[in-house]
Image: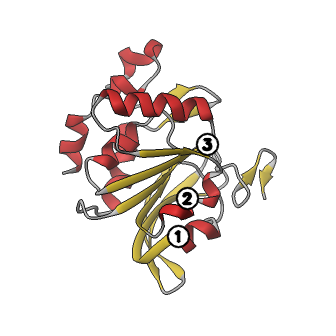
Amino acid sequence: RVLAAFRAVPRAGFVPPAAASHAYLDVPIRIPHGQVTTQPSLIASMVAALRLTRTERVLEVGTGLGFQTAILARLARQVVSIERFADLAAQARANLAAVGLSLVTVVVGDGTLGVPEHAPYQAIVVAAASPRIPAPLVGQLGPGGRLVHPVGPGGRELVTAFHKEGDRLIADAQLTPAAFVPLIGMHGMSKRGPS
């Protein structure tokens, strides 16, 4: 199902026009504000670890230009995505609408705070790194829910899959080493380092 979702979403529609020739390479692509769109193989690994069955409400932290959002929308019942840069969020909405996925909710805000008005979520995926999982995200994850998060300082971390038992997260698997941008926000990193 994950591979079918990738086949159904044209990545070229979710990268800057100047990078379209690289859209189908398995590489990250730079987007505005010093951000990147994650390489497809890493997105696939993270999304597969959520084990989505089309019944879940999913929170994505870090919309970027919306490619991972589009993949999630083909695998889950509902997707809420939060992006801290308003111009990226607006472009992501346009990109998603262009491929017929306009029912995804994209909001602008501090991703470390989550989007409580749509909680609880059965799955959360974070596309930026921090040394600790933000407490609001843990609080918004429903019982037995799954969360995938790059754990580390930004630039060198382990993408880790968790599930929720009671009020705490249990690590299930370290999926892969990776290099993500830092998760900036009240419960993540400051621009100077961990907060």
Find numbered disc 1 in the image and state the secondary structure of the residue it sits on. Answer: helix
The residue at the point 78 percent across, 44 percent down is 191
Q: Quadrant of residue 84?
A: top right
Determine which of the numbered discs, if any, sits on residue 115 in the image.
2
Q: Quadrant of residue 112?
A: bottom right
Crowdedness of circle 1 by 10 Å Cα count: few (<14), some, many (20+)? many
Image coordinates of residue 166 in percent, x first then y, are 49, 87
**Image side of residue 94 versus residue 7, left or right:** right
Crowdedness of circle 2 by 10 Å Cα count: few (<14), some, many (20+)? many
| Camera sees residue 124 | yes
Image coordinates of residue 76 in percent, x first then y, are 29, 56
Q: Are marks 2 and 1 in contact (CB under 8 Å)?
A: yes
Q: How many marks?
A: 3
Determine which of the numbered discs, if any, sits on residue 126 in the image.
none
Dot placed on the residue nearer the N-terminal end, 2 or 1:
2
The residue at the point 55 percent across, 71 percent down is 138
Find numbered disc 3 in the image and state the secondary structure of the residue it sits on. Answer: loop
In the picture of the structure, the residue carrying the numbered disc 3 is: 181
Extreme right residue here? 192
Q: Are marks 2 and 3 in contact (CB under 8 Å)?
A: no
**Image side of residue 195 versus residue 108, left or right:** right
In the picture of the structure, the residue carrying the numbered disc 1 is: 140
Crowdedness of circle 3 by 10 Å Cα count: few (<14), some, many (20+)? some
Image coordinates of residue 115 in percent, x first then y, are 55, 58
Find numbered disc 2 in the image and state the secondary structure of the residue it sits on. Answer: loop
Residue 142 vertical position relative to residue 190 in the rendered view, above or below? below
Disc 2 to disc 1, C-alpha distance: 8 Å
Tell me, what colour scheme is on the image? secondary structure
Nearer to us in this view, 146 or 173: 146
Q: Amino acid at mark 3?
A: Val
Q: Amino acid at mark 2?
A: Val
Image coordinates of residue 152 in percent, x first then y, are 62, 57
